[in-house]
Image (cartoon, grey):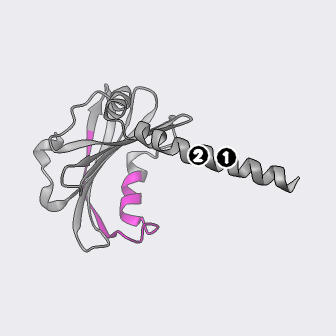
Amino acid sequence: MLRKILFGAGLLALITIALAPGIWKTLTDAVRINALAQRIASFELPEGYQPDYAVEILDYTIVAYKSVAQRGHLAFLQTPSGVIPTGTVLEGYLVNNTAAATWREASVLRTETRTIRDQSATMTISDRINGEGQRYRSLNLVFEGRDGTTLLAINQPETQWNDEAIE
């Protein structure tokens, strides 16, 4: 019996190792990333960003882009409606997030209401300092995407932040 279990575990490990490069290629395929992003929301990718990865698990989709400089990130997280908190709750989370010990001195700079897909959406702009002591600016926008509630998160070093590009 033990021999069968070990054989099965070994076979599973070999299959996983064999499939890993293909799975990684799928996760990082630029065409797939862009297609998934457009399924979530219609948008134009800001200059200086390139596809990073995309993951679909059950009713959850994550699509991420990275800046060419490797320090900025733009991501969409789409979930079933009601999973992502409202803008008010999200604003409190940004300031009170103690779980992420690598970020410190978080402060909300402003909160604005935007209209996305004919619905009111809350956008929060905040600053934080990362574990390396570099100040980052973040945008968090919660809105109803095409197939569920969506969080758009943009994080960049403060020195690279461009308010006009956000518009």
Residue 126, placed above or below residue 106: above
Q: Residues within 10 Å of mark 1 (few under 14, many from 20)?
A: few
Describe the element under mark 2 as helix, strand or loop.
helix
Q: Residue at x 43, y 36 (%)?
A: 26
Q: Residues within 10 Å of mark 2 (few under 14, many from 20)?
A: few
Residue 77 visible, this orientation: no
In this rendered view, identify the residue nearer to me: 29 or 5: 5
Would you say 18 lies left or right of 151 here? right
For residue 33, what is the image quadrant?
Answer: top left
Q: Residue at x 76, y 50 (%)?
A: 7
| Amino acid of disc 2 | Thr
Would you say 9 lies left or right of 151 here? right
In this rendered view, identify the residue nearer to me: 70 or 90: 70
User: Residue 56, percent across and down?
Assistant: 49, 36
Residue 136, placed above or below residue 38: below
For residue 136, what is the image quadrant?
Answer: bottom left
Q: Is residue 104 magenta?
A: yes
User: Residue 133, percent across and down?
Assistant: 25, 74
CB of mark 2 within 8 Å of CB of mark 1? yes
Say which residue label 2 marks.
Answer: 16
| Amino acid of disc 1 | Leu
Say which residue label 1 marks.
Answer: 12
Residue 163 visible, this orientation: yes
Disc 2 to disc 1, C-alpha distance: 6 Å
Q: Residue at x 63, y 50 (%)?
A: 13
Q: Is residue 95 magenta?
A: yes
Residue 33, placed above or below residue 160: above
Q: Residue furthest right?
A: 1
Q: Which residues are magenta?
A: 90-113
Residue 156, placed above or below residue 34: below
